[in-house]
Amino acid sequence: MLVNYVAVAHVYVIFDNNLKNLNKSIMKKLLLFGALIAGSAFTANAQTVLLEDSFETYQDFAISGFGNWITIDLDQSDTYTGGTETALWANAGAPQAFIIFNPTTALVSNATSGEEVRNFDPRTGLKYAASWAAIMPGDGVGGSGDGPNNDWLVSPQVTLGASQNEVSFWVKSMSPTYDLEEFQVGVYTGTGTPSTSADFTVISTGTLTAPTTWSQITYALDAYQGQNVRIGIHCVSVDHYMFMVDDFRITTQTSAGVKDQLASQISVYPNPAKDLVTVSNNNNILVDGIQIIDVNGRTVKSVKFEGVTSAEVNISDISAGIYMMTITSDKGSVTKKIIKN
């Protein structure tokens, strides 16, 4: 599309025939038209979701073996429970890194005041991944382990794209009563299976804290473009309560293959044209409408159709020059440059 922009500017200068006499209004037209073409270039890119998971499809209270996620319990401590007099859910209190927690089936309750403030609500759906506090030595509550938390939640492996790679997820501290949860974010590269903290490159700055309301964490991953990676979320809380993770997502930027394919399937001819322009295709793409936009960004012609595979547009009544034609169809929309003689 940038090549088109150069070509458009070049053609316009030829029409003027005197570069030195280009006035501000002409330059504004060029800029507006360039912006229009650039806009179509940007819309020709698309965000591709490499991984998206809200933990809804996994068995309640699983602590390992959910999907292609990996959990690494490096502290090997028994864990706290809360929100109910007696914790009856599977794996309650057992050594674990993260658990697929469903507060509804766990029969826990929220509390907005009193001795212990807590909120178990997911960000979306019914479940999330949670890391309960490791029982610290000398806590006097039984159990064993080294504490504090040294627990990893590791994403399935993805292959990053060439640009605009990004990971995002949401975190929350279940309670402010015992201070905010602490965590780090790391990247594992390769096709193997990480098993220790040394396997990760930490990309977060220092230790992060999770607020008591759901908050989004986002990191650019372009330093690892084209590589196989896993993202690790490392809970390092010291005697807190529960660290919560929900709505995990890794994306990349790619050329919109669907839109590019659509553009290649739709023909506009003749081009340049004087009177009639034909829009057609051989793939049963149904055209619903056509708009023609001038260098000022104004729509000079708009025609609607009833889902046709071939259409003619009369451009004899518009001035000579360069235009952008936006074609809307049942498969999406594309923009093509046309020249009116």
Image: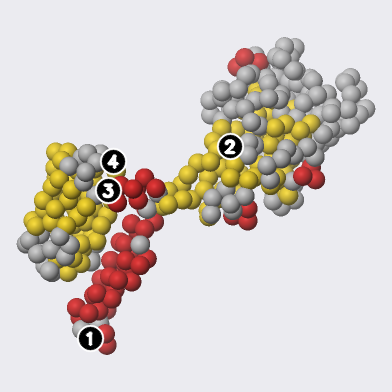
Quick check: marks 2 and 3 in contact, CB under 8 Å? Answer: no
Sequence-wise first label, 4 or 3? 3
Above or below, 169 relative to 302: above
Measured as percent of width and height from the top left, residue 281 is found at: 21, 46
Q: How many marks?
A: 4
Q: Nearer the viewer, mark 4 or mark 3?
A: 3
Question: CA–CA distance between discs 4 and 1?
Answer: 43 Å
Circle 3 crowding by C-alpha within 10 Å: few under 14, some 14–19, many from 20? some
The disc placed on residue 248 is 2
Kind of element beneath mark 4: loop
Q: Which residue is mark 1?
A: 18
Q: Which residue is mark 3?
A: 265
Q: Nearer the viewer, mark 1 or mark 3?
A: 3
Amino acid on which the number 3 mark rests in the picture: Gln
Q: Is residue 11 above or below residue 249?
A: below
Judging depth in this view, the residue of 42 and 214 nearest the camera is 42
The residue under label 4 is: 331
Residue at image x 35%, y 51%?
260
